[in-house]
Amino acid sequence: MIPRLDARLLMARDANTLDRLHEAATGIGFFTVFNTDITPKRMHAVLAQYRRFFLLPEADKIDLDMSRTGANRGWGASGSEQVDPAANPDFKQFFDSGFSLPADDPRSKLAVYAPNQWPQALPDFQSDIEHYYDQARGVAMDVLRGIARAIEAPDDYFDQSFETPMALLRGNYYPARPAWATARDFGIATHTDYGCLTLLATDGAPGLEVRKRGGGWIPVSAPPGEFVINFGEMMEIWTDGLVKATPHRVIGTDRERISIPLFFNPSYDTNIAPRGSGNTIVAGEHLSRRFSETYVHLQKPR
């Protein structure tokens, strides 16, 4: 069972909600949250913007193709990402944008802070997506503060690590599962997220499945205006295994599906080693390595 939590009660530090959050974070690693500052109406509008983009002719997207730009910003065509080497490349399109740094900041040369790329064919797309990006980061930070309290750390324990976050906003377009698909074909194959916390909005279509600890899969979905939240490898490392990064996948159904994950990751130079361990694990190095293992255009020939 995937817990469903009220964001207002979480921000109020309601004891029962914090207990359920602790149980979700340290157990299944997934929960859903409702009653945030992002309304269903707002979410429908953002989903519509991504849909317009994905339905553009390829000629209007090709200049944003990551295989041309060489960075994790812009458009990824179907088959351009492979999260599981044992499966075929993932059957979906996606569009990535992220945190912008001033051009004179030396970190702006890092791939995780690459300049955003925007479609010229959709004049309002950039402003709408940038506004949603700001809103989603606010919701994710509120949840992260709740996580800090739930694991008995100070409420602001994570705050200073997110001043220049490697926060990546992605729109995913999963077409209906094709008739030719095999057991090696997925919308996105089984994987754990690489970063800290993922705030996932969807259009409500089914497809996402979470692996149970004892084996088997649990379907999970949320209507527009509610969010699926899970944790990535960074958070599991950071909390010394207390918070779980849980494998999940999208097989695909006879319906198309749009999802919008915000991968909420700390600043590049954040040390994500467990508190008191005396070790150093640089967040940006972890994330860069995992990107190079996933994006087909960044993979080295085997």
Image: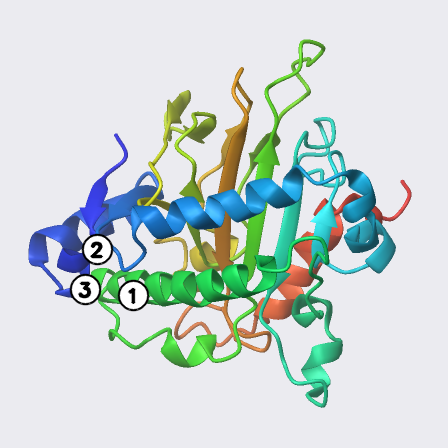
Quarter assignment of residue 281: bottom right
Residue most extreme to the left: 15
> Answer yes or no: do the residues labelled 1 and 3 have beta carbons within 8 Å?
yes
Q: Which mark is residue 7?
A: 2
| Residue 23 versus residue 211 in the image, above or below | below
Tally the marks. 3
Q: Amino acid at mark 1?
A: Asp
Q: Quadrant of the C terminus?
A: top right
> Answer yes or no: do the residues labelled 1 and 2 have beta carbons within 8 Å?
yes
Q: Quadrant of the N terminus?
A: top left
Image location of residue 223, percent across then percent down: 33, 36
- At 37% from the left edge and 77% from the top edge, which residue is drawn? 159
Q: Amino acid at mark 2?
A: Ala
- At 83% from the left edge and 43% from the top edge, which residue is drawn? 59
Q: Amino acid at mark 3?
A: Met
Evaluate whether residue 24 shows in this view.
Answer: yes
Image location of residue 202, percent across then percent down: 43, 39
Q: Nearer the viewer, residue 277 or 53?
A: 53
**Element type at mark 2:** helix
- At 73% from the left edge and 32% from the top edge, which residue is drawn? 89
Q: Nearer the viewer, residue 31 or 99?
A: 99
